[in-house]
Amino acid sequence: MTDKKKKTGLELLREPFPANMIGKLPKPTKRQTDDVKADFKAGIRCKICGQWHHPKVAHLDYVGHAALTDRLLMCDPEWNWAPVAAVEDGTPKFDAIGGMWIRLTVCNVTRLGYGFPDGKTGGNAIKEVIGDAMRNAAMRFGAALDLWHKGELHVDDNEDDGGNNAAGNPPKKPPPPPPPRKDDGGNKAASSPPPREETPAYDEEAIAFVIVQLRAIWDLIELKAYWKALAELQPGIQSAPGVAEAKGAQKAAIEAKQEKPGD
C-alpha cells in the first residue's frame, strides 16, 4: 500500500482547512445591531464565537488571518502581498469607500484581491482591510473556496440514461413561465421586462482611482482578472465615464509592448 502523495505549493493552498482552523463569524442584521446598541442587556455572550451580540444572530464559517497566513507559509515561505496603488509616502492607497486592492503572490503566481473595513475605524479598519483583502485574493487561488461558496462545487449536470444527473439526484425542472397578462381588449399583452437592479453611484475620485489602477497593470491576464473582479466587487463602475476606455487603451498598450519587447 503506497502512501498518498503529500500536496505542496498551490495544490496545498486548495486543500480544505481542518475544523480547528475554521472560525465562526457573527453576521447580525441591522435591526439586531440597533437593538443591542439601544439596550446592552438585549445581547448575550455568545458560546459559539465568544462575542457579545443579539441572541438570534446567524454565524458564518470563515478562515481567520492567522490560519490563512499559516497555510500561505506552508505553501510558499516567500509569499507576499503588495497594494496595487500607493500614496506619495509609500503607504497603501485606499479607495473612496475605504477599501484597498492588493496583489497576492504565492509560488511566483500573482492574483488580485480586494479588502473592505466593514464598518471598523482607525487602526482596526486597516487591519480588517488587509485581512479581508488577503482572504479575497487567496480565494482566487482556491483557498477555503468551499466556505465562500454556498452551494456544491463541480457538480456534473449531465444526465445519464436513467434521467438522473451524476450526483444521483433527479434533474431539476425549470419553473413554468408566468401566465401572459391581458390588456383591456382581452388580447395577450407582451410580458414586461423584470425591473433593473440599481447599481451604486461612484464619485469622481473612485472612478479616477480605478482608472489609475488599470493604467498600472502591464499583464493581459492580470488585466482580465482585475476587470472581472471589478464587476463582482464594484458593480456598475465598469460603465462609469472613462473606465471602459481606460481598460481598452491599457490592453492596446500591453499588446503593443509585447510586440516590441525591446522598447
Image (cartoon, rainbow, N blue to C red):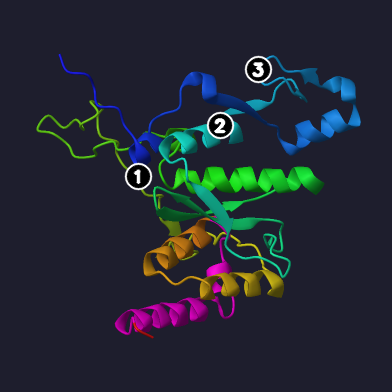
- Residue depth check, mark 1 versus mark 2: number of the one nearer the observer: 2
Q: CA distance from mark 3 to mark 1?
A: 42 Å
Vertical order, 4 against 172 (above or below): above
Say which residue appears at 71% left-offset and 56% top-offset: 98
Label 1 is placed on what type of residue?
A: Pro
Q: Quadrant of the C terminus?
A: bottom left
Question: Mark 1 vs mark 2: which is more N-terminal?
Answer: 2
- The numbered mark at residue 62 is 2
Q: Percent x, y for residue 166?
A: 20, 31
Q: Cβ–Cβ below 8 Å for labels 3 and 1? A: no
Quarter the N terminus occupies: top left
Nearer to us: label 3 or label 1: 3
Q: Nearer the viewer, residue 24 or 214?
A: 214
Q: CA distance from mark 2 to mark 3?
A: 13 Å
Q: Quadrant of residue 142?
A: top left
Q: Position of residue 158 (x, y in %)?
A: 19, 40
- In the picture of the structure, the residue carrying the numbered disc 3 is 48
Which region is colored magenta? 233-261
Number of labels in the image equals 3
Badge 1: residue crowd in 10 Å (few <14, some 14–19, many ≥20): few
Kindly tell me whether residue 175 is visible in this rendering.
yes
The amino acid beneath tag 2 is: Tyr
| Residue 18 x %, y % | 46, 22
Residue in front for this viewpoint, 145 or 54: 145
